[in-house]
């Protein structure tokens, strides 16, 4: 089976979990219990991984779009027999409005088929394969034409209005016709076998309620800047990647979509990264509201817990789990035969010196919102993180890109150590007696002078990826973004020019390093920010719009873009790509923003 391009997929979310549905009408990824739970559909990663397809029997021309300000997807199929629309959504809780969206999502996937013209023959193909396709369920017919699928800890109930569904061992194949003006609705409800039974919803009512819930959510979130359509779309994607029960933002919906087809850099991104914390918080503050930012911050503080001698992990589970030990699903072929398929992410074990800086910078961004007097746990966390930086900044680490080879003295890690101490000094009046701003300031200045001395490479004419290295790295673009150096500083300006020349492409993409086979979307948006701060707003806009052109037809970005084919690569949709878009758009709106 030929697997669809990554860009073919649309994103559905109930802020508890998410699903990917292709242009061909097949739901190929859904982990219904929560984003990082086992899948029931995983054809994304193996042709036999499980799916639920609803599509015309005849070949069709496809048009699709989200309902405005929602993640409710309407796909129109035009066939020789006529036209039909399929509207897909993960149902919101009935009556959920505003920040209630996702808190008690019922884990129900709704699919509504509407006849638009003619009479179209349709086929439903339902083949659930729970626990990453390790399980093949028993299927049983139920009253009113429903089907119950059970295997291991999973129960699924499939229903259709006016449709009698009949199981055939491990799947349901069902043909039906839809005439103009006719509606046929289906819903698939998940539950744990030993918990409450799957929810039973009227799919038409659930769809209408879900649209209203998303619309109500967006109405209380205003964005006053440039590129409002693209920013609101990216903000909706970020909301869709937010696990509403905790406020954590998943880095992506998926695991193991490859950075290079056939390669092995295939990682599980369904967790929440503290490294991305300050960037995420900034994007939420700009395009959402302080409530989302503060909930994310509260999740991080609880997840970190009391600071000890051990490094703070780079990522956590969506409810704050720390041990995310990695294993391979050797029974899955991987997307386009790109192995291994990984569950878990061993980056949680790495030493990452920049983590404290991301968190302390987030506290700084929220300090007015947090009040004049910090609570004891918050004071302890900030002081503990600052002390950890003060005692470890001189060590090597794995760097921003989480390399799995030898540790080095990465430039970006040292810069974020500087940021941690700089903001800790500024926060010191609120941190109580344990704060040591004089010592922190002295170490901060030592870090800065070390970066300026060791990070610059005379022959390259740029700040490079690691001390003593001649390897360019797009992470150097982060220096002006975090305020370490102005973009107009001669050495920084030279770095921007060299990175753009050596790592950039004609269509606006920026690679992370010279041998990177694809453009990294976030780095491309960093370059936009750098150009704005360097006073080149017109060039920044041209570059920004070129990068926008790499999104799919729904405005979704994966992590990377193939330089030859333009295909999207990596996990999908990728939070950092959309965070980069929001922050770059706001930088163009307000170049003085921090």
Image (cartoon, rainbow, N blue to C red):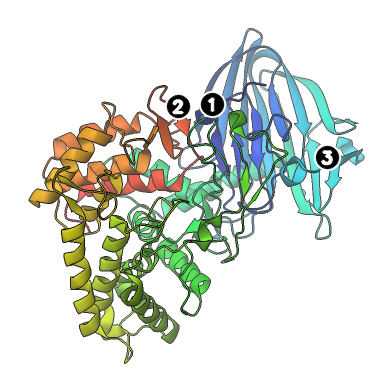
What residue is shown with label 2? 567
> Quarter-wise, where is residue 366 in the image?
bottom left
Disc 3 or 1, which lies upstream in sequence? 1
What residue is shown with label 1? 5
Q: Is residue 349 above or below residue 463?
A: below
> Quarter-wise, where is residue 246 in the image?
bottom right
Contact, mark 3 vs mark 2 (Cβ under 8 Å): no
Disc 3 or 2, which lies upstream in sequence? 3
Contact, mark 1 vs mark 2 (Cβ under 8 Å): yes
For residue 483, the mark is none
- Asked which secondary structure carries label 2, the reply is loop
* Nearest the eye: 590 or 357: 357
> Where's residue 72, x and y in %?
56, 39
For residue 136, the mark is 3
Q: Is residue 555 above or below residue 316?
A: above
Q: Is residue 324 above or below residue 226?
A: below
**Residue 466 visible, this angle:** yes
Position of residue 340 in the picture relative to residue 241 (left or right): right
> Where's residue 198, x and y in %?
78, 51
State the residue at coordinates (22%, 72%): 444
State the residue at coordinates (82%, 55%): 197
Position of residue 83 in the picture relative to residue 156 (left or right): left
């Amino acid at each position: 089976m030929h697997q669809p391009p990554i860009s073919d997929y649309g994103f559905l979310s109930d802020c508890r979990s998410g699903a990917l549905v292709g242009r061909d009408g097949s739901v190929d990824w859904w982990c219904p219990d929560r984003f990082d739970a086992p899948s029931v559909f995983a054809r994304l990663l193996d042709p036999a991984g499980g799916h639920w397809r609803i599509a015309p029997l005849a070949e069709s021309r496809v048009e699709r779009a989200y309902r405005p300000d929602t993640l409710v997807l309407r796909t129109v199929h035009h066939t020789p027999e006529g036209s039909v629309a399929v509207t897909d959504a993960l149902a919101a809780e009935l009556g959920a409005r505003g920040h209630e969206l996702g808190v008690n999502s019922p884990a129900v996937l709704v699919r509504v088929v509407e006849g638009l013209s003619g009479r179209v023959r349709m086929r439903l193909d339902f083949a659930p394969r729970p626990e990453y396709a390790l399980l093949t369920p028993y299927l049983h017919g139920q009253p009113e034409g429903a089907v119950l699928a059970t295997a291991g800890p999973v129960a699924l109930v499939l229903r259709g209005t006016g449709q009698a569904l009949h199981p055939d061992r491990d799947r349901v194949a069902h043909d039906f016709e839809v005439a103009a003006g006719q509606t046929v609705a289906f819903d698939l409800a998940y539950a744990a076998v030993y918990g409450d039974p799957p929810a039973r919803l009227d799919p038409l009512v659930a769809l209408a309620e879900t649209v209203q819930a998303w619309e109500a959510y967006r109405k209380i979130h205003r964005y006053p800047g440039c590129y409002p359509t693209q920013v609101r779309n990216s903000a909706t994607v970020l909301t869709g990647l937010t696990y509403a029960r905790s406020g954590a933002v998943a880095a992506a919906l998926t695991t193991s979509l490859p950075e290079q087809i056939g390669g092995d850099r295939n990682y599980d991104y369904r967790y929440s990264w503290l490294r991305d914390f300050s960037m995420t918080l900034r994007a939420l503050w700009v395009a959402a509201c302080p409530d989302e930012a503060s909930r994310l911050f509260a999740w991080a503080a609880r997840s970190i817990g009391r600071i000890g001698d051990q490094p703070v992990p780079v990522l956590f589970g969506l409810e704050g789990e720390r041990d995310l030990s990695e294993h391979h699903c050797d029974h899955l072929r991987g997307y386009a035969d790109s192995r291994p398929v990984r569950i878990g992410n061993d980056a949680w074990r790495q030493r990452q010196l920049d983590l404290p800086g991301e968190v302390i910078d987030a506290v700084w961004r929220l300090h007015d919102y947090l009040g004049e007097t910090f609570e004891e746990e918050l004071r302890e966390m900030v002081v503990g993180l600052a002390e950890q930086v003060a005692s470890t900044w001189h060590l090597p680490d794995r760097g921003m890109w989480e390399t799995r080879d030898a540790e080095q003295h990465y430039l970006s890690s040292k810069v974020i150590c500087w940021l941690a101490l700089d903001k800790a000094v500024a926060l010191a009046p609120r941190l109580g007696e344990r704060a040591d701003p004089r010592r922190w300031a002295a170490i901060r200045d030592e870090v800065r002078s070390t970066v300026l001395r060791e990070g610059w490479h005379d022959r390259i004419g740029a700040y490079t990826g690691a001390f003593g290295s001649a390897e360019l790295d797009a992470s150097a673009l982060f220096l002006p973004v975090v305020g370490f150096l102005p973009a107009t500083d001669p050495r920084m300006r030279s770095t921007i020019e060299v990175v753009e020349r050596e790592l950039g492409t004609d269509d606006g993409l920026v690679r992370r390093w010279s041998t990177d086979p694809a453009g990294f979307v976030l780095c491309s948006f960093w370059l936009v920010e750098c150009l704005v701060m360097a006073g080149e707003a017109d060039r920044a806009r041209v570059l920004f719009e070129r990068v926008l052109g790499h999104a799919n037809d729904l405005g979704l970005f994966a992590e990377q873009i193939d330089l030859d084919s333009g295909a999207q690569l990596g996990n999908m949709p990728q939070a950092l790509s959309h965070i980069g878009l929001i922050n770059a758009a706001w930088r163009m709106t307000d170049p003085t923003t921090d």
